Image (spheres, helix red, strand yellow):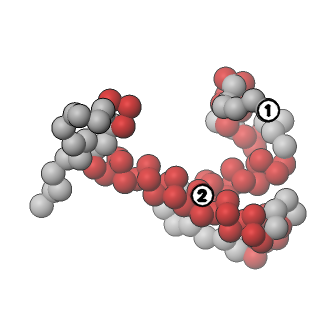
Amino acid sequence: MSRGATEDLVAKLADYECSDLPERTKAALRLADTLSGDRPSVDAAFMAALREHFTDDQILDLGMTIAFASGWQRFIEAFGVVPDRWTEHSPSPFQPLRE
């Protein structure tokens, strides 16, 4: 099993709906887009579409993973954290909170 994303795969993500990615992958990406948007909402039709590819347990796991990743991204943006430039003995990557 290989790990990581190829350049070809990453290029397909920009317009995944028109790509040749598997429908299951597109469904997961739709959920990611929905949950990381400004007003996340999953209606009955969307849930039914997700259930074509995932069990309820898988939807829960996927949703929790997306929520964590999206929340982490918002956290590091809010605090100006640049993880790839921070090392263990460097000053804290956190900036003072705004008043």
Check the picture and name the quadrant holding the C terminus.
bottom left
Question: Outermost residue, front direction?
Answer: 89
The image quadrant that residue 22 belongs to is: top right
Identify the amino acid type marked 2. Thr
Asked if 55 appears above or below 29 in the picture, the reply is below
Q: Position of residue 57 (x, y in %)?
A: 75, 69
Looking at the picture, does residue 58 appear above or below residue 9? Answer: below
Residue 37 visible in the shown view: no
Residue name at image x 61 percent, y 54 percent: 33
Name the disc covering residue 10, or none: none
Q: Position of residue 93 (x, y in %)?
A: 25, 41
Q: Nearer the viewer, residue 71 or 61?
A: 61
For the point 67% across and 23% down, which residue is it? 7
Horizontally, residue 27 falls left or right of residue 38, namely right
For this orientation, the residue located farthest to the right is 52
Q: Position of residue 31 (x, y in %)?
A: 67, 58
Residue at disc 1, secondary structure: loop
Point out the residue furthest to the left here.
99
Q: Which residue is mark 1?
A: 1
In the rendered image, the residue lying farthest to the bottom is 44
The percent coordinates of residue 15 (x first, y second) are 69, 37
Residue type, label 1: Met
Instruction: Kindly identify the residue that appears in the image at 76 percent across and 48 percent down.
Output: 26
For marks 2 and 1, give the CA distance.
22 Å
Query: Toward which corner of the image does residue 17 lie, by quadrant?
Result: top right
Disc 2 to disc 1: CB gap under 8 Å: no
Q: Residues within 10 Å of mark 2 (few under 14, many from 20)?
A: few
Say which residue label 2 marks: 65
- The reply to whether residue 26 is visible in this rendering is yes
Residue 67 relative to residue 96: left or right = right
Q: Eyeballing the image, is 9 above or below 97? A: above
